[in-house]
Image (cartoon, rainbow, N blue to C red):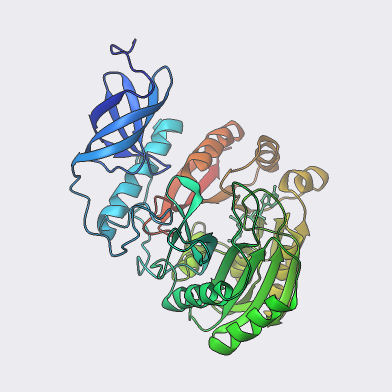
Amino acid sequence: MKPSITLRQYDTIKLKIEKIVYQGWGMGRLSNFVIFVPNTLPGDYVSAKIIKKRKSWAQAVCLEIIEQSEFREKAICDKYGLCGGCQILDVSYENQIKLKHKILDDCFTTFLPEEKGKTKPFIQSPQSIYYRNKMEFSFGTSDIDKNKITIGQKKRGDFSTIIPLNKCYLMSDISSKILGWTQSFFTETDLTSWCPTTHKGILRHLIIKRTKNDEQYLINLSVNDDPTPLYSRYAKQLQETFKEVTSVYLSSNKEISDTAFSKSITHLSGNPFLEESLGPLTVRLSPLSFFQTNALLFEALYTAVSNQVPLSKNDTVMDLYCGTGTIGLFLASKVKKVIGIEENPAAIEDAKINASQNNISNIEFMCGRVKNILKFNTFSPDVIVVDPPRSGMVPKALKRIGEIECPYIIYVSCNPVTMARDINDLKAHNYVLQSLQPVDMFPNTFHMETISLLKRMN
Ligand SMILES: C[S@@+](CC[C@H](N)C(=O)[O-])C[C@H]1O[C@@H](n2cnc3c(N)ncnc32)[C@H](O)[C@@H]1O
């Protein structure tokens, strides 16, 4: 049906927001146009300006919330709305779960309408604040005093502006104190903050990792510079000030892309890694390896993965996209053998050490891309666990996983859109979705983790 109204770029419109979709954007309808408006909630009646228009949908910026959604409450953080860290901090935790449930149902209804009703209740975070064990902060410059260094999060929708933070409710009080101390330390030097538009300046990111008991912190300072005695002094004084800081690294990042990740990393002081407990195991958290970011829930996530299918001592499990091997290590005592595959050599090194330090000998790790390792080797597992990055699996990896003809696939994902897309593709290999278990690993944001169980039909 043709849209019955004419809509142009820069038109100002008024509309009621019906729901939020996966990116966290509000969605409403104007005649036959679907309109996406970031920073709005279901029930908001807004005035908005169209910034992008396509045949049947448009994107708009919210100019004013004329009538507020019933979901909106007062947020505890005074930077909320400006800071890009949280998108739904002003929604009660109970309602956040309801909104996310609807997002997940909508993703599956789009790709797999026949699978409705398979979603289980969310496994919720024991706390909706102070839950993260890793955060990346950016350096910036104060608007009031250009000589003053600030540290904070990117502004919502504007990656070149930093919102200074004295406190962040997502991580911990100690991490907020480390931010403040680091800001004062570098304000006393002649170093400047790196600017993502001019690519000039030195100080780029401060990445903080911690253990769930809050006793060990790993700090990774990212700079557009080489290691110098100044950074060693920073590390020394930081450790003298905070007994919890057990490890300090310097990342030399001279790339123009605005990423906190750098391969050129120098260990400045302390232990080279953090030690985290995971059930009966002790595992390493290193600066460059992935680790699940909700300190209060990663164990519940792995327990839910291990409860998806009954495992026996005769079973072989493949843990694809295994990172530091945590899922496989967690399952190893229940099965005959685990094979982990991961492309990051640093993560594989950690995975092997994790196995040997926990006396787990029935696990083997292979370093490389999933699609390549599956191409050049033959496997016949009883269960495959996949936990790919947000972008999901590439078609060749999907095809090769399908060709193994394993009875069960447990798909763990932080992106329900790519997960639903991939599950739809696995239908061609006779896999049928059995259940969806959402886990709220990321309170105050629209993100979620989901575990899907797929069974192969003969
Ligand atoms: C979401 S993390 C999962 C890590 C792990 N399962 C865990 O729970 O800690 C995804 C992992 O996939 C790895 N990865 C990304 N693309 C890959 C590929 N094509 N082949 C193998 N590993 C890949 C990343 O390095 C990362 O460690």
Image quadrant of residue 244?
Answer: bottom right
Residue 371: % across, % down? 73, 43
Residue 281: % across, % down? 59, 78
Asked whether 198 or 168 is in front, the reply is 198
Q: Residue at x 46, y 67 (%)?
A: 132
164 on left or right of 256: left
Query: From where the camera sits, is residue 16 visible?
Result: yes
Image quadrant of residue 208?
Answer: bottom right
Q: Is residue 380 above or below residue 144?
A: above
Image quadrant of residue 172?
Answer: bottom left
Q: Is residue 299 above or below residue 35?
A: below
Q: Residue at x 49, y 67 (%)?
A: 298
For ligand 1, which image quadrant applies? bottom right
Q: Residue at x 71, y 56 (%)?
A: 342
Asked whether 349 or 327 is in front, the reply is 349
Q: Is residue 118 above or below residue 48?
A: below
Question: Which residue is situated farthest in the right direction here?
Answer: 376
Q: Where's the N terminus, which quadrant?
A: top left
Residue 341: % across, % down? 71, 56
